[in-house]
Image (spheres, rainbow, N blue to C red):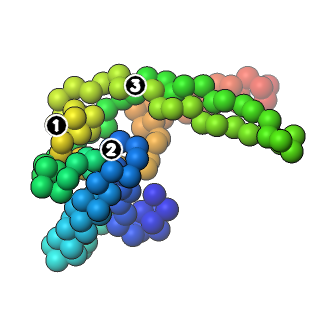
């Protein structure tokens, strides 16, 4: 995301399942994608941010990339708080929650079918639909508190 924020095309790549199984196949898949991006017109466009997930499969079983929207997950498991032998507090981040929306067209669905999943992302988290409502609320709050 940092590269994208600095105007550099960026891509985050992960294997779909934890572990190192078929890591060389994932690396070969990413290398092929990047090589095609370099010679294609994609790098000449505005900066972009891609989230790419590679199945943990042998190279010949990995299906072609599909562009998808993000699915949604249920809430993550709670953070585990422990104290280490030196008395310092440690926090273990809980596992991601299970898929809540893995319908057709989502990254979860395509990943289950063995495809490389590409999701174009954007960073602007602004609630554009409600900016004017929030603006009015803030004016009302400010006006009341300053009177």
Task: Say whether disc 1 or disc 2 marks the residue closer to the N-terminus.
Answer: 2
Binning the other alpha carbons within 10 Å of mark 1 as few (below 14), some (14 to 19) or many (20 upward) gives few
Work out whether residue 8 or residue 145 is closer to the camera in this orientation and state it: 8
Is the residue 107 above or below the residue 57 in the image? above
Binning the other alpha carbons within 10 Å of mark 3 as few (below 14), some (14 to 19) or many (20 upward) gives few
Q: In this view, does 131 lie to the left or right of 68?
A: right
Residue occupying image coordinates x 22% and y 26%:
103
Q: Is residue 106 left or right of residue 121?
A: left
Residue occupying image coordinates x 83% and y 41%:
85
Residue occupying image coordinates x 35% and y 42%:
17
- Give the spatial CA distance, label 3 vs label 1: 17 Å
Is the residue 58 above or below the residue 18 in the image? below
Is the residue 124 above or below the residue 37 in the image? above
**Where residue 67 appears, x then y in whole percent?**
19, 47
- Give the spatial CA distance, label 1 vs label 2: 12 Å
Q: Name the residue under label 3.
A: 98
Task: Say whether disc 3 or disc 1 marks the residue closer to the N-terminus.
Answer: 3
**Where residue 18 appears, x then y in whole percent?**
40, 43
**Where residue 130 appears, x then y in whole percent?**
45, 30
* Tag of residue 113: 1
* Tag of residue 16: 2
**Where residue 142 appears, x then y in whole percent?**
71, 30
Please say whether residue 25 is visible from this viewpoint: yes
Binning the other alpha carbons within 10 Å of mark 2 as few (below 14), some (14 to 19) or many (20 upward) gives some
Residue occupying image coordinates x 40% and y 47%:
19
């Amino acid at each position: 995301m940092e590269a994208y924020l600095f105007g550099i095309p960026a891509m985050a790549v992960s294997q779909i399942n934890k572990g190192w199984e078929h890591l060389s196949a994932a690396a070969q898949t990413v290398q092929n994608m990047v090589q095609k991006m370099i010679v294609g017109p994609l790098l000449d466009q505005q900066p972009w941010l891609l989230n790419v997930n590679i199945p943990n499969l042998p190279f010949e079983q990995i299906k072609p990339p599909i562009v998808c929207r993000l699915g949604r997950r249920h809430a993550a498991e709670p953070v585990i708080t422990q104290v280490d032998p030196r008395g310092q507090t440690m926090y273990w981040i809980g596992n991601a929650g299970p898929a809540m929306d893995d319908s057709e067209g989502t990254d979860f669905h395509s990943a289950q079918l063995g495809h490389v999943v590409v999701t174009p992302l954007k960073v602007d988290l602004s609630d554009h639909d409600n900016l004017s409502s929030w603006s009015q609320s803030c004016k009302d709050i400010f006006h009341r508190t300053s009177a």
